[in-house]
Amino acid sequence: MILTQVAPAASTWPPQLELRVPFEPTAFPSDGRTYLTYELYLTNFAANPITLRRVEVLDADDSSAAPMAAFEAGQLDPQVQPIGAQTSAEGNSDPHQLAGGATVVVFLWISLEHGASVPNHLRQRVTTAEFVAEGAVIGTHHRELLVLGPPVTGTNWLADDGPSNDPQNHHRRGILVFQGRALISRRYAIDWHQNQNGKDFSGDASDKRSYYAYGKPVLAVADSTVVTARDGLPDNVPRHNGEFTPAVEVTPDTVFSNHIVLDLGGQQFASYLHLQPGSVRVKVGDHVRRGQVLAKIGDSGDAREPHVHFQVQTSSDPLAGEGVPYLIDHYRLKSADGVWQTRTHELPLGGRLIDFGQLSPFSSGK
């Protein structure tokens, strides 16, 4: 009898590209649209390099639906950030090229028209020069959207480095590894500067008192409990770029300098950073009312000029939590044609000029 050896069928290995979303987004409204903001981590577990061509976001519960968003070629360039020093064989950095073992972060910012349905789950599809990979199914309503009062009062407040997908936005791109996890606590943070005629100050730029924001009150955004209240560190001399020298060396302990953290409930915490020395009016354990004056705006910590950095995160430590979106119950926004428009239950985006009105009757401070 003659035995014939049958060759085993060729096996097809799945693409060795990991798709991972460390923190699910929560859809939030602004300027009449709905936004989803999150990060897609791509890691090449193969030895050979791969080249990114296209990233699509799909409705995971409807396989027949067209992609909600698609990014390719030049659209991907500002959204992709390599992890570590990664260069091509020619020695040039190429965000589309993933060497073996390399990781890139794709910063996703999806804008939906007003009234458009937000899928409950999203799936990511990545097309490379070599294959197509799908995965990283995530939800879109990870946290309750808290409706808060404004953190400051008055008009002409600039939402500097507020929510956006600008590659130069140091809040949006502020990945920090803390306790072994990569986090972005500042994902939705805003640096509130007060602005007049396109400038933050009048007079001597090196004098903190020349800045419109300096000494203005910061307000409790909700009835809440004080979990951190630090005071006593000095203000800086306002300076930008290479001229900046902090009054105290910037470390993890001093980066926020004088600051307050409020427990809003539901594992959400509001942080106010860079406060004026000697101005903090509350202590740990105090119960505060929405609109109550907590402190004054200063120029302490890692601040180049007077402003208040405000964010909501999932930890009482402003460094250790994930940044989450929230809504402000009422404000006016200045449109491009100079008209003030009323907004309710929205989160201001970066670069917007905002009017919050006057102090609440519960502020009891001047």
Image (cartoon, rainbow, N blue to C red):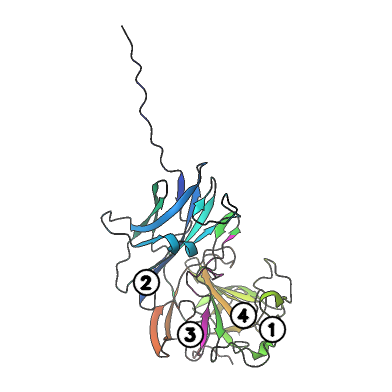
Cα separation between marks 4 and 3: 29 Å
Q: Which residue is mark 1?
A: 278
Whether residue 302 sits left or right of residue 362 in the image: it is right
Marks 4/2 in contact by CB < 8 Å: the verdict is no
Could you tell me which secondary element the residue under label 4 belongs to? loop
Q: Which residue is mark 2?
A: 34
Q: Quadrant of the C terminus?
A: bottom right
Q: Quadrant of residue 14?
A: top left
Cα separation between marks 2 and 3: 19 Å
Q: Position of residue 142 (x, y in %)?
A: 42, 62
Could you tell me which secondary element the residue under label 1 belongs to? loop
Marks 4/3 in contact by CB < 8 Å: the verdict is no
Cα separation between marks 1 and 3: 29 Å
Bounds of the magenta span?
153-176
The reply to whether the magenta stretch includes residue 43 is no
- Under mark 2, the amino acid is Thr
In the rendered image of this protein, does residue 67 appear above or below residue 281? above
Q: Quadrant of residue 344?
A: bottom left
Residue drawn at 32 percent across, 59 percent down: 67
Marks 1/3 in contact by CB < 8 Å: the verdict is no
Q: Nearer the viewer, mark 1 or mark 3?
A: 3
| Residue reaching furthest to the left | 64
- Under mark 4, the amino acid is Val
Q: Quadrant of the N terminus?
A: top left
Q: Nearer the viewer, mark 4 or mark 3?
A: 3
